Amino acid sequence: MAVRAVRGAVQLERDAADHMAEQVGALLTAVIERNGLTPEDLISIWFTATPDLHSDFPAAAARGLGIGLADVPLICAQEMDVDGAMPRVVRVLAHIDTDRPRSGITHVYLGAAAALRKDIAQ
C-alpha cells in the first residue's frame, strides 16, 4: 500500500449550511466512488473554503454524512483571498491508502469547479 493524495473541489451556489452539507457530501461521495475507496482507506482529509463561506465548517458537514468518517482526522482552513478567484468554493485534499499508482488516482472537480483544473479530465 502507498499513501496517495486525491484533490477535488465544488462551487456552492449559496452560503447555507444545508447546501454546504449537500455539496460536500456529493464531493466526498464522488472522490470515494471514483477511486474505489472505502472509509477505511481514508487517512485524513484537509478542507479549505473561500473566505465568503461562513455558514458551516466543511469538516462538520462531512462528519454529518454518516459514511464512516468518525475516526478519520478532518481539518478546515481558509483559502487565500485572491482577486478574481472563483467564489464559494470548497476544496478537499484527501490522503488515502491505496495500491493505485499516482497516475491511477481520479481527482474530482464538480460543476463549475471543473474550471479550476481544466488540465484534469473529468
Image (tube, rainbow, N blue to C red):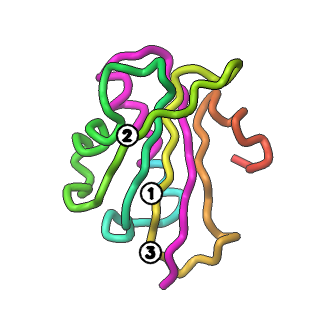
Foreground label between 3 and 2: 3
Tag 2 secondary structure = helix
Q: Residue 97 has which mark?
A: 3
Label 1: which residue? 32
Q: Eyeballing the image, is 115 above or below 41?
A: above
Which numbered disc, 3 or 2, marks the residue that appears first in the sequence? 2
Q: Residues within 10 Å of mark 2 (few under 14, many from 20)?
A: many
* Vertical placement of residue 95 versus 110, above or below: below
Extreme residue toward the right, this view: 119
Q: Position of residue 16 (x, y in %)?
A: 34, 17
Where, by quadrant of the figure, is residue 15 drawn?
top left
| Mark 1 Cα shell of 10 Å, populated few (<14), some (14-19), many (≥20) | some
| Badge 3 element | strand
In the rendered image, residue 70, in percent from the top left (x then y), is placed at: 20, 56
Q: Please identify the residue farthest to the bottom as the structure is shown.
A: 1
Quick one: label 3, few (<14), some, or many (20+) residues within 10 Å?
A: some
- Residue at point 62%, 59% (across, down): 106
Q: Is residue 78 above or below residue 97?
A: above
The numbered mark, 3 or 1, whose residue comes first in the sequence reads 1
Is 82 magenta? The answer is no
Who is closer to the viewer here, 38 or 7?
A: 7
Give the structural element (helix, strand or loop) at label 1. Answer: helix
Disc 3 to disc 2, how far (Cα)?
A: 21 Å
Look at 65% across and 70% down and name the residue there. Answer: 104
Q: Mark 1 or 2 closer to N-term?
A: 2
Cα distance between the residues tagged 1 and 2? 11 Å
